[in-house]
Image (spheres, grey):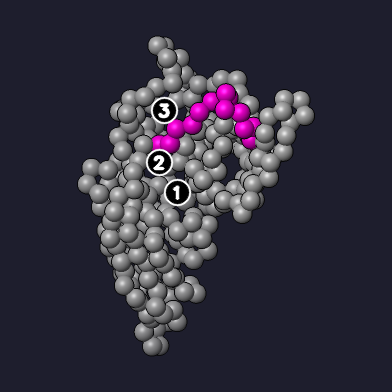
Amino acid sequence: MIARTKIMPMKFTFLSAVVALSLFVNNPSSGQTAQVHSRMQPYTFDTGLLSSRAGEAATRVAFSGVVKVPGSPWLRLSFSGVSLGRASYLTVTSLGDGAQQRLDARALAQWKNSSAYFNGDAVRVDLHLASGDSNVFARMSEVMVGDDGSGESQCGATDDRIVSTDGRAGRLLNIGCTAWLIADGRFVSAGHCVESASLLNTVEFNVPPSLPNGTIQHPAPKINMWPTLRPASIQTTESVTTGASSKLFLTLKRG
């Protein structure tokens, strides 16, 4: 099954790509959102405390382990505790398609102590220990597990969507909406898609086709996934013409 997009009239939300400002119309009648099919599953993973050796000059892989949930179509790691010191970092690699993400302390903060989304039921986590770093660790108590598509459709009796390969079209997660990258480096999306900022955590581009049963698949994270940055507060304004409530929040681009 090829993922396709049906273009319909809508009210728009603007999100910037680097440090972004997003404006959306809070109008319940404009549409509803649905989270992608997933669940949080308990999972114990712990690298233990790791420290560089005296006189060690090079960064080395001090820990390597596999996170596997048999039969899962995709995974996203959620770290309950992590300390990477000055220069140590994690790499997360899909054992399904080889997609990889590097997470240092800065990147983990931007991803809110989570990883990108990875296809397949297993990923390898490597901890690269830098010279001079001590008491470095990463641990998890749960993992986000993708569920198979439910067969739900918004197409009605006739599926008249058109296949699109436009690189400006992206997907908002964890709500399954569309974002469109416009000329001035901002995103445009339906207002109802960002009514719940807590559900807006990632923008994906160059999204591959879904599986035949409707289960979503994810692009390689290095340049195709941008995490959003939840604001400390949300500003609200009122439209003079319609009386609709609008809200402003921040997102962040990250390769």
Q: Nearer the viewer, residue 42 or 171?
A: 42
Residue 54 visible within the image:
yes
Query: What is the secondary structure assignment of the residue under circle 1?
Result: helix
Mark 1: few, some, or many residues within 10 Å (few <14, many ≥20)?
many
Residue for point 48% across, 20% down: 162
Which residue is identified by label 3?
Answer: 3
Q: Are marks 1 and 2 in contact (CB under 8 Å)?
A: yes
Q: Which residue is mark 1?
A: 221
Snapshot quadrant of residue 36: top left
Range shown magenta: 24-36
Dot 2 falls on a residue whose secondary structure is loop
Residue 185 can be seen in this image? no
Measure the C-alpha gap from mark 1 to mark 2. 8 Å
In the rendered view, tell whether residue 51 sits above or below residue 115: below
Q: Residues within 10 Å of mark 3 (few under 14, many from 20)?
A: some
Q: Name the residue that disc number 2 marks.
A: 218
Q: Amino acid at mark 1?
A: Pro
- Dot 3 amino acid type: Ala
Label 3 residue SS: loop
